[in-house]
Amino acid sequence: MSVPAGTREAQAQAPSQTRIALRTVSRSLGTSLTAARRAVVRAARAVAAFCEPVTGVISTTGWLVLAAAVVSLVLAWAFGWIEFAFLGFTLLAAVLVSIAFVFGRMHFDVGIELQPARVVAGERALGRLAVRNAGGAPSAPARIELPVGAGLAEFVVPQLAPGEEHEELFAVPTNRRAVIVAGPAVSVRGDQLGMLRRTVRWTDPVELFVHPVTARLLPSAAGLVRDLEGEITKVITNNDISFHALRAYEPGDPLRNVHWRTSARTGQLMVRQYEETRRSQLALLQSTERAHYASEDEFELGVSVLASIGVQVIRDKTRLSVATERVSLRTATPTTLLDDSCRIDPVDRAYPTMRDFVREATKRLPAPSVVIAVGGSQLPLAEFRAVETVFGNDTQTVAVRIDLGAPSSLTKIAGMTVATIGELADLPRLMRRVRP
């Protein structure tokens, strides 16, 4: 028995229409579930924000005590164990009693002072915390917590009369180069067991800059850039101080360059050309990859060398750019350079090679006349030599290799000057001998 053609086509289209309908229903269901999930998340966040003033007071210890109380009461109800019921109600009573310790308001004026605000690593720095009762009634005793670097200082402020001030002095550890942050100062109210903890922030953080130890160098880094200052190049320009030749006037040439006497004699406008004079541009770069240094002390010596050279070049009023893999240091004044050097930290592998780092660090800078590359004893000399290939023949490259405890020396390797620094005290002597 044959089936009409129209019937066969209808039977073939029926499964396709069913699949399309199922996909449409599935897509609509997925969209509805996603919208419902987002609505639940928004509602949960709204409830959490509403309850935060209460739940934020409960510490981790408090949550553990509440959880233990609930578990104890559930066990007592499920198994009829009176001991767990007693334990659960005791824990709940402890939480309820601790609520009384978080009530009360304080009216304080709190100040943090660090003297001095900048020190050299190893020098002494002191901090002062001043708390004054700014309210109209005597204040209750309070506890002040003050983060200082990686540590936490705690001070007990006694009862203060209106307008009375309480002062606390503390020492700041400055044995290593760093930016030490003191603050914010917060007052803490709560029970002795630490189940409930209510804090009020009173100050902003204050920074103490612990500068690296530096060596004093002679002006111009003992001739490092002096020989380049004012050196004439073969580049021809329309504006400079070294006269080169005359040429015929072209539209757009500034009239101030017209040589009127020659123009009058030849009957044609003639303009001056000049040889470009090199302006010293020094790029000071340090590799901070952890693997390039044998120890943490060797890394610190590298930062001290970088800062010592940079400070002297800034004092010489030579244009300077200083950079590491992660930080570009400000060079407006010696103080800003030293402040930024406090933020230099070792990094893991940032660039495949030293050459890649130098190329990336200098690609947006004016063409430097001198490049000083600083690296550790674990950085191969071939990496230093590869830095030369980044620049043209007009750029002189000096490699400063930090090798803590090794004899300091100055050598030439295929035209590159390599200074090996074993201790910071040797830096001035070696820099006096450097001639690019």
Image (cartoon, grey):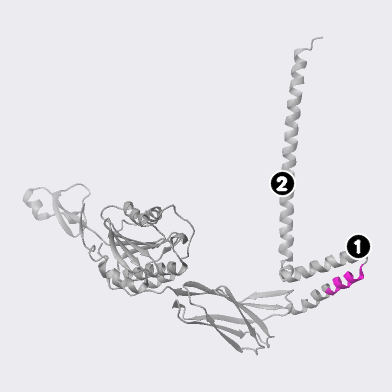
Query: Within the image, what quadrant is residue 425 found in?
Result: bottom left
In this figure, which residue is indicated by the disc labeled 2? Answer: 34
Q: Which residues are magenta?
A: 81-90
Percent coordinates x, y for residue 422 in the rendering: 37, 69
Nearer the observer, disc 1 or disc 2?
Answer: 1
Residue at (81, 76) in percent of width and height: 94
SS label for mark 1: helix
Sequence-wise first label, 1 or 2: 2
In the rendered image, the quadrant that contains the C terminus is bottom left
Residue at (75, 71) in percent of width and height: 62
40 and 319: which is toward the camera: 319
Q: Residues within 10 Å of mark 1 (few under 14, many from 20)?
A: few
Asked if residue 331 is among those painted magenta in the image, a careful observer would answer no
Residue 184 shows in this picture = no
Residue at (71, 74) in percent of width and height: 197
Asked if residue 83 is among those painted magenta in the image, a careful observer would answer yes
265 and 427: which is toward the camera: 427
Residue occupying the far front of the picture? 406
